[in-house]
Image (spheres, rainbow, N blue to C red):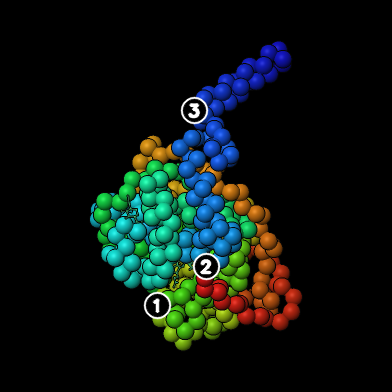
Amino acid sequence: MAFNTLSVVFLAITTARLTSAAYSKPVTCATGQKTAHAACCVLFPILDDIQANLFDGGKCGEEVHESLRLTFHDAIGFSPSLGGGGADGSIFYFDKVETAFGANAGIDDIVDAQTPFINKYNTTITAGDFIQFAGAVGVGNCPGAPRVPFFLNRPAAKAASPAGLIPEPFDSITKILARFAEVNFSPEEVVALLASHTVAAADHVDVTIPGSPFDSTPGVFDTQLFIETQLRGTGFPGTGGNNGEVESPLAGEIRLQSDAALARDPRTACAWQSFAANQAKMQREFGAAMAKMAVIGQDKRKMVDCSDVIPIPKPVVGTPHLPAGKTMGDIEQACTSSAFPTLTADPGPATSVAPVPPS
Ligand code: HEM
Ligand SMILES: *[C@@H]1O[C@H](CO)[C@@H](O)[C@H](O)[C@H]1NC(C)=O
């Protein structure tokens, strides 16, 4: 009896494997790598090229940060009422229109940096595919990032995105959540996407302190953003900030009004806190939210799953901690249903956070 049950289960598993194998047709590409779909082979030379020549040998620096931001600014350009094509490369094809949007301040740098690559491969993949591919590959260079799924086959954009669809740091949380709800993202998914600000800095929010990161470890995809945004602001803005900048807790660190408010708003505070000491949850939910964002406006049934082309990221470096000089008393508890995780501070006196060097 036991044996029979077991063999039925075994048969069911084997059949499931055969079926999915028949669908996926694993291939060895001419360049030697294996992937589930022959259509994905074209991505390997592009992968090698951007790792070497766009991301400076596979680093998690400025070009990666900007490429990740670009995935969002292209994808969010869709609204059921106003139109736009979502993740369609319109930010490249109609760059003169879109880079002029206020919310796109500074985005021209990365559009310019990606242009030679987009042009070089434009008979192989579209700009919409390139932008999401570069973002998935790039963020994977940051230790602790998830392997972000990548689907191929976005048609070229037909028109520019309408203005006003990209959230700004001075927008209210009500406005931000409503904008994301239009493209079917829950408040929890919005918070998960904001994990991106753990590998990020701002040049244009406060022009007196360019390159200031949002957390103390902008080269690592860790949870420090969710910890450090919960600390009481103690007077470290520059002098040029009124563009959605609020006081940060550390010299050299910049804090967006929107990040500060998401950390404290009753609709998002518990989700924000849930990532503060939970790398695995953050990885999982950020990866899932990115996969969803990357196909906004696209018909996923017409796309090919090339996720296995994306390199597997390195594990996170360090553990969740308070910056040196801080105590748990500096945490502004906002979630009302559970306490912020207890963390210890790095030893020694408070230090300042270094800017992210320009590329
Ligand atoms: C409420 C939504 C969001 C707002 C208001 C917002 C706002 C901003 C602002 C103002 C900057 C600084 C730009 C500069 O001055 O150079 C920034 C940087 C950045 N954002 Fe966001 N963002 C949001 C969501 C996202 C999402 C969903 C992603 C990606 C999935 C993302 C990725 C990034 C990255 C990686 C940077 C750093 C760019 C760099 O270091 O050059 N952001 N964001
Ligand atoms: C590809 O890029 C070249 C510039 O290198 C441009 O002349 C050409 O029109 C582009 N083709 C497509 C399909 O976008």
Where does the image place residue 41, in percent across and percent down from the top left?
50, 40
Q: Secondary structure at mark 3?
A: helix
**Image location (x, y in percent) of residue 79:** 30, 54
Query: Ligand 1: does it lie within 8 Å of the C-beta at label 2?
Result: yes
Q: Residues within 10 Å of mark 1 (few under 14, many from 20)?
A: some
**For the residues marked 1 and 3, what is the alpha-carbon distance in whole angstroms?**
50 Å
Image disc number at residue 243: 1
Q: Residue at x 51, y 61 (%)?
A: 54
In the picture, the disc for residue 88 is: none
Mark 3 and mark 2: span between their CA atoms?
39 Å
Closer to the camera, 221 or 176?
Answer: 221
Q: Position of residue 354 (x, y in %)?
A: 60, 77
Residue at x-position 57% and y-position 80% = 252
In the image, is the residue at mark 1 within 8 Å of ligand 1 by its beta carbon? yes
Q: Residue furthest bottom?
A: 239
Q: In this picture, is 3 found above or below 93? A: above
**Residue at the spot of label 2:** 62
Foreground of the two, 5 or 236: 236
